């Protein structure tokens, strides 16, 4: 018997699937596959499923922690993306040092999912 696990991918909600898909593409995520109701998105070697399904409480309690080499560069990049009003109410906060030592840019996708772009200090 083998209990080997080869991958783990979370599901992330989308209220307006095509707009949210475009948001993640603008951030730099590549589409591995896409159908009308689901897409697999990838950045680096990491993936998740964007699902055409939305429950506000689920979205507002979902988070992705993304290790990055430069939290300030991500802040600047995300700021340009969210300035496009198409993605409203997506938003981003300048990097802040957290009590566990990482420098983190917090960004919220249009559904309210919180993304932590964390630079290890």
Image (tube, rainbow, N blue to C red):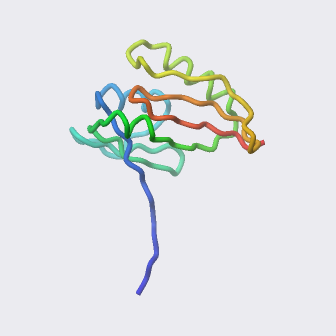
Q: Is residue 51 left or right of residue 48?
A: left
Q: Residue at x 65, y 39 (%)?
A: 118
Q: Nearer the viewer, residue 16 or 61?
A: 61
Q: Position of residue 96 (x, y in %)?
A: 71, 29
Residue occupying image coordinates x 66% and y 27%: 73
65 displayed left or right of 58: right
Q: Position of residue 78 (x, y in %)?
A: 55, 24
Image quarter in which the N terminus is found = bottom left
Residue shown at the point (61%, 36%) measured from the top left: 117
Q: Residue furthest front?
A: 57
Q: Nearer the viewer, residue 4 or 116?
A: 116
Residue 107 falls in image quadrant: top right
Where residue 121 sits, quadrant-wise, is top right
Q: Is residue 24 above or below residue 94?
A: below
The residue furthest bottom is: 1
Q: Residue furthest left?
A: 36
């Amino acid at each position: 018997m083998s209990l080997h696990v080869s991958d783990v991918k979370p599901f992330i909600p989308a209220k307006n699937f095509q707009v949210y898909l475009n948001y993640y593409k603008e951030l730099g995520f590549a589409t591995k596959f896409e159908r009308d109701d689901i897409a697999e998105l990838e950045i680096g070697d990491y993936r998740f499923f964007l699902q055409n399904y939305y429950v506000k409480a689920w979205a507002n309690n979902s988070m992705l922690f993304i290790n990055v080499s430069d939290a300030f560069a991500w802040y600047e990049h995300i700021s340009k993306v969210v300035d496009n009003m198409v993605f409203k109410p997506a938003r981003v906060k300048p990097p802040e040092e957290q009590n566990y030592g990482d420098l983190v840019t917090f960004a919220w996708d249009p559904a309210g999912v919180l993304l932590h772009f964390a630079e290890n200090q």
